Image (tube, rainbow, N blue to C red):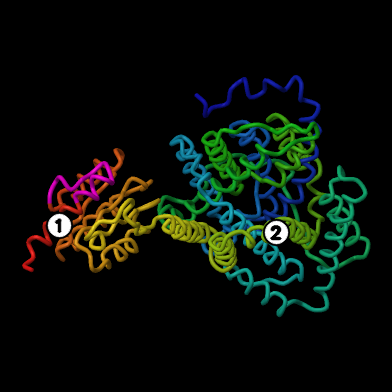
Amino acid sequence: MALLPHRSDYASLSRTWRGDLLAGLTVGIVALPLALAFGVSSGVGAEAGLVTAIVAGLVAAVFGGSHVQVSGPTGAMVVVLAPIVASHGVGAVALLSVMAGLLLVVLGASRLGRAVAYIPWPVVEGFTLGIGVIIFLQQVPLAVSSHVAPGQNTAIAAAEAIGTAPWPRALAGIGVVVLVAAVTLLVPRIHRALPASLMAVLVATLGAGFLGLDVERIGELPTSLPAPAVPGMGFTDLPALAGPALAIAALAAIESLLSARVASGLSGPDGRTTGPYNPDRELMGQGLASLAAGLFGGMPATGAIARTAVNVRSGGRSRAAAIVHALVLLGVVYLAAPLVAQIPLAALAGVLMVTAGRVVSIRTARRILGSTRQDAVAFVLTAVITVSFDLIVAIQIGLVAAALLTLRQFAKLGGVRREAIAGRAHDGDEHIAVFRLDGLMFFGAAERILHELAAVQGVEVVILRLSQLRYLDATGAQTLVEVIRTLEARGVTVLLKGVQDQHLDLVRRVGVIAELRHHRHLFDSLDAAVEHARSHVRRARQATPA
């Protein structure tokens, strides 16, 4: 079965194991401060972030649909989890992780993985921009050592944190953030292979200890993984958590599949791309990863594009790299937990602020804003709603906006044009109108075409040319019925020319042909239709008293 692990997943390991080992070590070092920071920022705690990176990272590496995807806690998931923790408490997170994981497994088994391909690029980038802004704002309270009421809008909470911060003591936390940001940005200039985030956290921790800064620390961490257990909340909690679980599952699916899709096009040190991925298996693997993380007391996980990119660019080519990354983090738990407990929370805030800055791409925003009006609107609308309201609502509204704006553009492709009768003019031709229907005639364009055709005046016969109509739906066919009915009621004879074979069954079922005055008013040739129209005009003149 294509959705399950297979020996072929490791067929290249004999050739790639050195690169996989190095990439796994590198990603593990990079992932450590991020896992701790995301755990703290979500409100669940540093321990949950670390457990999730280990357990979910290992399970997703084995069962996922990408050979190079690295999974764990991410900024987007933090944005969703923070208000949920505020509303339902920390104890609900493990159960939510299990519930969302089960939903993802069902989605994967249902072969719905390719649905993410239908999300437009401007919506994805607007969503990403909004996430970057929220991640940055979420760190402001940690940076200024201020505690704000949970569940607020992030912009409001950031402003409140600055206003209620314990000045001047808060300057120590801001100093740590600035130090972390400076080291993170300067280290790659010395050597790109150095783990900038880890070195920044290490320098900040040593500096805070040496100077005796009054800043909050992570605190005690476990020196081993907790034993797996079913989350302790009862069945009565399930209805209240159904909505949040659905939102988490939707986000995990979108982010993981987008990350896997991007990773498939990344090239490593050898210049070769990583190759295709299986979207349905990726959903199932991420579902199992979140389920396992929940059983160990962790939080929901997704594919992480930043860590995945580090993996690929460090030489990772098989699942072994992501497995090694999880084992490196496991080693930290058993060997270095007391040292990690001394890390200032402001240092983690600094790491995430830099990460948020990298998520926001000014270059990409300029490209979208300079493309088309509808894409620019979808991009801005998605970003604003993401920051102001909710991520899933933002995706939904962004998709609706993109769809409506795209339909508007498609509607412009459908049109009606009056044509002159070709050849030598005949007496009475001024009483014949030939209209050519072009492009798309569907529900988005039907109303406009109806008004244009029904407004024709001073003619006795109307010929509707349908041979250039590329698409016709039921609404478009019903519009033809209304046009024929309106014109015939005014005494105007309607002739149809060139109904295509793929449209013939539809126009018959909807009643277009039945609405004609005579079944012989359907023609394959324009010349025949024009000649028939001229005969109508002649008969009308002969019937009119002199």
Secondary-structure class at tag 2: loop
Q: CA distance from mark 1 to mark 2?
A: 71 Å
Instruction: Tell me which segment is drawn in magenta.
Output: 518-532
Kindly identify which residue carries mark 1.
Answer: 538
Hey, which quadrant is residue 144 in on the image?
bottom right
Residue 521 colored in magenta in the image: yes
Relative to 115, 41 lies left or right: right
Hey, which quadrant is residue 371 in on the image?
bottom right
Task: Please provide percent x and percent y for residue 208.
Answer: 88, 62
Secondary-structure class at tag 1: helix
Examine the rendered structure and indicate whether residue 408 appears above or below residue 48.
Answer: below
Examine the rendered structure and indicate whether residue 462 appears above or below residue 215.
Answer: above
As shown in the figure, which amino acid type bears the numbered disc 1? Answer: Arg
Residue 355 colored in magenta in the image: no
Q: Main secondary structure of the magenta part?
A: helix
Task: Please provide percent x and percent y for residue 339.
Answer: 83, 50
As shown in the figure, which amino acid type bears the numbered disc 2? Answer: Val
279 or 470, which is in the foreground?
470
Q: Residue at x 53, y 39 (%)?
A: 283
Q: Residue at x 25, y 56 (%)?
A: 426
Hey, which quadrant is residue 69 in on the image?
top right
391 or 203, which is in the foreground?
391
Kindly identify which residue carries mark 2.
Answer: 360
